[in-house]
């Protein structure tokens, strides 16, 4: 979890914005995220054409097939090494990050503490923005309420990279303004964020949006920078304990290296920040159901 030195690039229509945006946190100083690429697109949200499977509470999910892939990167940070083979069972993943409108339903139903920056979310205007300011426990509890769970690090990475090992969710092309919400330097309330599903160029082949940029996403695992040295091969679930929980994907204030799909970060599980959100997963069908 070191700070990256931004890569300078300006080729054709590619944009590399070497910005370092400062996130805000409530009541706690978690381990810092990586340094902060392309600024948000102004295009309208586009519904993915993929067939939705396992939709629940109005949130579409897609089936991520079982597969084996090379997890990590020899060109990344130390915590991304060594590259190791991992197999993951089929599972469902939310197409979008959890939104303000869906989290509002959870708040009304379960009456938990409101997230950090919740007072900056405006009903109607920000309904399709991803919710920020939730800690790991909030994310876990929401997913349980929705009949789901948080994805593991391995599940998150195979969803973002596929079995072919993509650098970014969409492939190896360097991020442009149409791929991801990143490279911002200042929090401007929920207007800093893009509506979920806005970046058509940034989706995975399966139709999952915003796995790069917008918000870091909590995953189920404890975070250990050395875990890849002893990770299980089949369906790894991370260390058994630790002081930090893992996050993936990078955020609005990160650069092109930080939003790579093999990049990792760890925050204290009770950290509530304006650059962190989440999405949920669900167990897939058993092999005998195919």
Image (cartoon, rainbow, N blue to C red):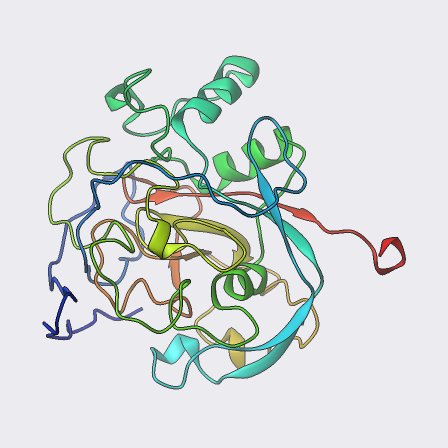
> Looking at the image, which residue is at 49% across and 76% down?
165
Q: Residue furthest right?
A: 288
- Residue 259: where, in percent of width, then height? 31, 62
Q: Seen in the image, is 63 located left or right of residue 102?
A: right
> Looking at the image, which residue is at 37% across and 29% down?
128
- Does 195 sit above or below residue 31? above
> Looking at the image, which residue is at 50% across and 51% down?
207
- Residue 253: where, in percent of width, then height? 20, 52
Q: Nearer the viewer, residue 122 or 170?
A: 170
In the rendered image, the quadrant that contains the C terminus is: bottom right
Which picture quadrant has residue 133? Answer: top left
Q: Nearer the viewer, residue 149 or 174?
A: 174
Q: Seen in the image, is 215 located left or right of residue 53?
A: left
Q: Seen in the image, is 160 located left or right of residue 151?
A: left
How many numbered marks are there?
0
- Does 75 sit above or below residue 177? below
- Residue 17: where, in percent of width, then height? 12, 62
- Does 177 sit above or below residue 99? below
Which picture quadrant has residue 37? Answer: bottom left
In the rendered image, the quadrant that contains the N terminus is: bottom left
> Looking at the image, which residue is at 30% across and 71% down?
173
- Residue 82: where, in percent of width, then height? 48, 85
């Amino acid at each position: 979890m070191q700070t990256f030195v931004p890569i300078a690039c300006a080729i054709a229509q590619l944009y590399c914005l070497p910005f370092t945006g400062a996130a805000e946190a409530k009541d706690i100083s978690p381990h810092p995220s990586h340094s902060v690429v392309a600024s948000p697109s102004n295009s309208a949200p586009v519904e993915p054409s993929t067939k939705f499977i396992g939709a629940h509470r109005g949130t579409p999910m897609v089936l991520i097939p079982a597969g084996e892939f090379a997890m990590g990167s020899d060109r990344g940070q130390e915590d991304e090494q060594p590259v190791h083979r991992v197999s993951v069972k089929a599972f469902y993943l939310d197409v979008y990050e959890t939104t303000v409108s869906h989290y509002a339903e959870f708040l009304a139903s379960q009456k938990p503490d409101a997230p950090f920056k919740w007072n900056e979310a405006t009903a109607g205007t920000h309904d399709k923005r991803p919710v920020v300011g939730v800690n790991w426990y909030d994310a876990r509890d929401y997913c349980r309420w929705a009949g789901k769970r948080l994805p593991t690090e391995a599940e998150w990475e195979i969803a973002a990279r596929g079995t072919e090992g993509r650098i970014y969710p969409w492939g190896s092309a360097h991020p442009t303004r149409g791929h991801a919400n990143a490279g911002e330097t200042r929090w401007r309330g929920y207007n800093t964020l893009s509506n979920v599903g806005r970046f058509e160029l940034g989706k995975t082949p399966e139709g999952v949006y915003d796995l790069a940029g917008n918000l870091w996403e909590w995953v189920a695992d404890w975070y250990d920078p050395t875990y890849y040295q002893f990770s299980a091969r089949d369906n790894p679930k991370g260390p058994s304990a630790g002081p930090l929980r893992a996050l993936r994907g990078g955020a609005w204030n990160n650069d092109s290296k930080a939003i790579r799909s093999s990049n990792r970060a760890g925050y204290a599980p009770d950290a509530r920040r304006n650059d962190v959100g989440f999405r949920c997963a669900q167990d897939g069908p058993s092999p005998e159901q195919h």
